[in-house]
């Protein structure tokens, strides 16, 4: 729900095992930025992972974290544990509802892609890095500062040049979509709370899904 499945599919395809020789990891080139991103996935290095992403990705993630905290505050206003669990499941879906509250952006990343990072760490050394190696350019070029490429694992990855470095921009739209969906859930929570209270007062059947 809310794009989580897309994250899982994306990381799964980025993490396909494709062996090859070690090449430059210099993020001043798009190809080097891709390989550095592969290293971050393989080693489960969140600092390197976040450093490989665009500034906008970081902002969108923080906005998503802020919305999640607002959702959790609304959920706490439900009058019973049963009601809070129902509201959490309705607002967040199965995956996110199990992990709130989240403390920081790294904790949120672990929810979104943690399983795939754990999988990647178990692969043969260098395999994940080679999986994200560039096969061909789909659109853009290094001169324009924007590129979408096809990796050796047959996945499309978008990059942008920020200053002297190339960064991954693939997650930007997914994070925005997730945040917009959660903002919609945030608007419906007060209505759901009122309906829950109404049913409790009238001893009506409470919603279960």
Image: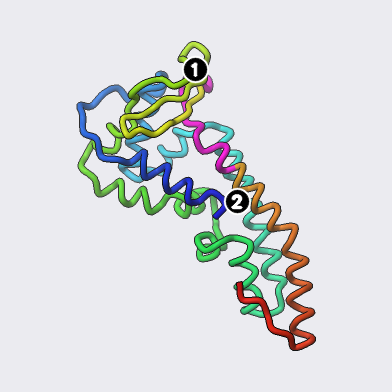
Q: Based on the displayed image, in which of its 4 quarters is residue 27 positioned?
A: top left
Residue drawn at (57%, 52%), measured in percent from left and top? 2
Which residue reaches farthest top? 143
* Total numbered circles: 2
Q: Locate residue 30, reporting x and y percent.
A: 41, 21
Badge 1, how many Cα within 10 Å: few under 14, some, many 20+? some
Task: Tell me whether circle 2 and circle 1 mark residues in contact (CB < 8 Å).
Answer: no
Badge 2, how many Cα within 10 Å: few under 14, some, many 20+? many
Q: Secondary structure at mark 2?
A: helix
- Inter-mark Cα distance, 2 to 1: 32 Å
Q: Is residue 166 magenta?
A: yes
Residue carrying label 2? 65
Q: Which residues are magenta?
A: 161-175
Q: Quadrant of the N terminus?
A: bottom right
Of residues 96 and 23, which is closer to you in this image?
A: 96
Q: From the viewer's perspective, is residue 180 above or below residue 56?
A: below
Residue carrying label 1? 140
Q: Locate residue 192, reporting x and y percent.
A: 73, 69
Q: Is residue 12 left or right of residue 199?
A: left
Q: From the viewer's perspective, is residue 13 above or below residue 184?
A: above
Q: Based on the displayed image, in which of its 4 quarters is residue 193 positioned?
A: bottom right
Q: Based on the displayed image, in which of its 4 quarters is residue 55 positioned?
A: top right
Q: Secondary structure at mark 1?
A: strand
Q: Quadrant of the C terminus?
A: bottom right
Residue drawn at (74%, 61%), measured in percent from left and top? 188
């Amino acid at each position: 729900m809310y794009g989580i499945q897309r994250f899982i599919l994306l990381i799964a395809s980025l993490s396909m095992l494709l062996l090859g020789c070690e090449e430059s990891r210099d993020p001043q080139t798009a190809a080097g930025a891709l390989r550095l991103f592969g290293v971050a996935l393989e080693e489960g290095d969140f600092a390197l992972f976040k450093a490989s992403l665009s500034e906008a990705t970081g902002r969108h993630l923080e906005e998503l974290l802020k919305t999640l905290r607002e959702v959790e505050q609304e959920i706490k206003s439900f009058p019973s544990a049963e009601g809070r669990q129902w509201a959490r499941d309705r607002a967040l879906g199965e995956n996110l509802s199990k992990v709130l509250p989240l403390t920081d952006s790294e904790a949120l990343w672990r929810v979104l892609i943690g399983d795939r990072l754990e999988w990647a760490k178990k692969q043969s050394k260098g395999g994940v890095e080679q999986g994200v190696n560039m096969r061909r350019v789909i659109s853009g070029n290094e001169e324009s500062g924007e590129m979408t490429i096809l990796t050796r694992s047959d996945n499309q990855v978008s990059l942008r040049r920020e200053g002297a470095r190339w960064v991954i921009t693939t997650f930007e739209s997914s994070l925005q979509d997730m945040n917009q969906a959660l903002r919609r859930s945030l608007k419906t929570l007060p209505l759901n709370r009122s309906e829950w209270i109404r049913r409790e007062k009238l001893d009506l059947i409470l919603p279960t899904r």
